[in-house]
Image: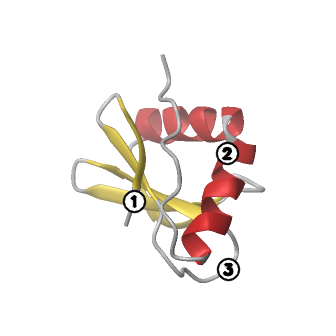
Amino acid sequence: MPELSRFYGIIIVMHFDEHHPPHFHARYGSASIAIEIKTLRVLDGHLPPRALGLTVEWAALHQQELLRAWDLAQSNQHPQKIPPLP
């Protein structure tokens, strides 16, 4: 499970050989969530509102990088790190 980014206590990861649709996981404390990359809709889980907002903001800025990371992870290759929110 490669870590793609980390910012404001939020950890973004992507699992190898994961099910569709393309998505990533975010953890904040004990809360976790799965977010679809193309639509930025929540697939599963829950984050506090502020952490969710920051996660979606970050994902909107990095959708193309997330899709490339998804393709690599599906091939069991480590994706590159993605810059955090400033």
Toward the viewer: 72 or 52?
72
Q: Residue at x 48, y 61 (%)?
A: 78
C-alpha separation, residue under disc 1 versus residue under disc 2: 14 Å
Query: Comparing marks 1 and 3, which lies closer to the viewer?
Result: 1
C-alpha separation, residue under disc 3 versus residue under disc 2: 17 Å
Q: Amino acid at mark 3?
A: His
Left or right: where does residue 33 sit relative to residue 79? left
Which structural element holds mark 1? loop
Q: Residue at x 42, y 37 (%)?
A: 51
Left or right: where does residue 17 sit relative to residue 29? right
Toward the viewer: 15 or 57?
15
Residue 60, how many percent across, how many down? 70, 37
Identify the residue position indicated by label 3 in the image. 20
Residue 49, how many percent across, how many down? 45, 39
Toward the viewer: 53 or 14?
14
Task: State which quadrant residue 1 falls in.
Answer: bottom left
Q: Amino acid at mark 2?
A: Glu
Task: State which quadrant residue 31 falls in.
Answer: bottom left
The tag on residue 65 is 2
